[in-house]
Amino acid sequence: MRSTLSTFNEVWQQQFRHRILAQAQHFSEQTHFLIGCSGGMDSMLLLSLMSELFPKKIRTIYIDHQLQPSSAMWGDVVQCHADIHNVPCIIQKVDVRAGNLEQQARQARYQAYLQHLQPNEILVLAHHQQDQAETVLLRLFSGAGVNGLAAMQQIDVRKEMTIWRPFLDLSRAQVEQWSQQIGLEYVTDPSNQDIHYDRAWCREVLWDVLQHRFPKMQAAVARSSYLMQDAAEILDEVLQTDWQQCATFDELNLTKLKELSHARQRQLLSSWIKGDAQYRPSYDMVQRLQQEVILAKPDAQATLHVHPYYYVRYQKTLYRLSHEVLYAEKLSILPDVISQRYLLGQSIQVAAGRFKIESQSLGLSPLLFGRELQLLKRQGGEKIHLYGRVGHWPLKKAIQDAQILPWFRHTIQILVVDNVMLGVFSPKGFWLAQSEYLVQGGWQPSLISDCIFHQSLSHDE
């Protein structure tokens, strides 16, 4: 007669299979699965179950970090297990950069996943309930907020990939019991017991102490992560509204920011600095941005560097700038004088952007077509008699009135012929100067795209 325990195990295991199938219904019929398999007990059990439930839709990948003498042999174990289940297997070696070993190994691993993921595949990982609880505790110890404490999601849709963690509600004890029951062969990474690493210390030293005092701690902490995920989703809805009202990727309106509560200001700044990065900045970094840049004196040239960007305030706006944009003037090799010849319909590229020579009701004389004109680099102190204004004005004043940002002012060039000023190329367009060459039915350079547009292409691409 079969034991009650064996019957119970079979029942909950079958129920768990149904849960996996139910989760899979979130994906289309064409979706396939790439299973990250380290050779450890958790991922080997995942590979076995996925091969049973989705035999024609899975591949597996073993990432050899080359950090342990036996790492290549572990790949052989994964390959053998995959062969038994008729699952295609990829063995990928990676080089782990120096620094925080856990972080660098993770980064190398995910880069390898991205390299092999096909357009119709999602990544499947074997994180279980204890992994989730450990993640929450470690992030709590690091001072994480709501998003950090939300930890791992069961179905994690990211910009570059989707990750599915079907074991996230499965306890470590259940994984062990199931693996022993089916006689699963797996490998043990000694670094998992090396308490030099934070996660191993949490698992080997802290875990037993906490669980002895709070026996249901693992499930309780994991449950807190789900509550935090709800809170993070609600917070994200508020953030999206605030973002639309206050910010673009490159700019943040400080006047509108100040209309928000202090808490919403901090959350928006944190999310805005994060941008396209994977993680938000630290709480201290957000405070530094507020104190050193936003609240700096109006005449202060305050800048905060949060890799890879620089955050600069100009008047009532906060700007996100790349190194190339902020220091473009220092990096520029723009000549003092450039000779050019223009024709009607011609497109020209100058430092301020791309322009097209077009007919206008009022403009420069067609007699200038084909003549050698000079573009002069702005030196400072120039005066210009702009069309429509009385008398000569300092060019600096015109630039300020046009609210051209300081880091783009070096792109301004003056168009002259025979020492007569014809106009000025700027990121805001071409400014006609009053001169003897100004006629009815003339021509002007029309702005097609400014230097700001070209600088932003690197982000858009």
Image: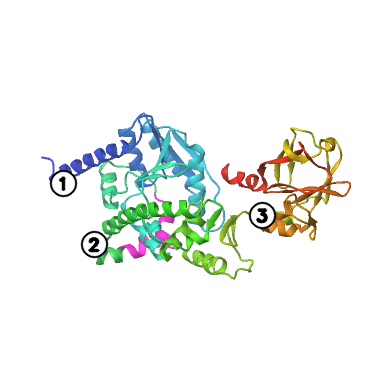
The residue at 42%/61% (across/down) is 264
Answer above or below: position of 294 versus 132: below
- Asked whether residue 225 appears in the rendered view, the answer is yes
Which comes sooner in the sequence, label 3 or label 1? Answer: 1
Q: Which residue is mark 1?
A: 5
Q: Which residue is mark 3?
A: 402
Name which residue type carries label 1. Answer: Leu
Residue 115 on the magenta span: no
Name which residue type carries label 2. Answer: Pro
Q: Which residue is mark 2?
A: 215
Which comes sooner in the sequence, label 1 or label 2? Answer: 1
Along the horizontal axis of the image, is 417 left or right of 151?
right
CA distance separating discs 1 and 2: 22 Å
Task: Decide: few, some or many residues near mark 3? Use Cα within 10 Å; few <14, some 14-19, many ≥20.
Answer: few
Q: Nearer the viewer, mark 2 or mark 3?
A: 3
Q: Position of residue 61 (x, y in %)?
A: 45, 39
Q: Do the CB atoms of the residues marked 2 and 3 lie less than 8 Å apart?
A: no
Q: Nearer the viewer, mark 1 or mark 2?
A: 2
The residue at 48%/60% (across/down) is 257
Judging from the image, what secondary structure is the residue with disc 3 in? loop
Q: Magenta residues: mostly which secondary structure?
A: helix
Quarter of the figure with the C terminus: top right
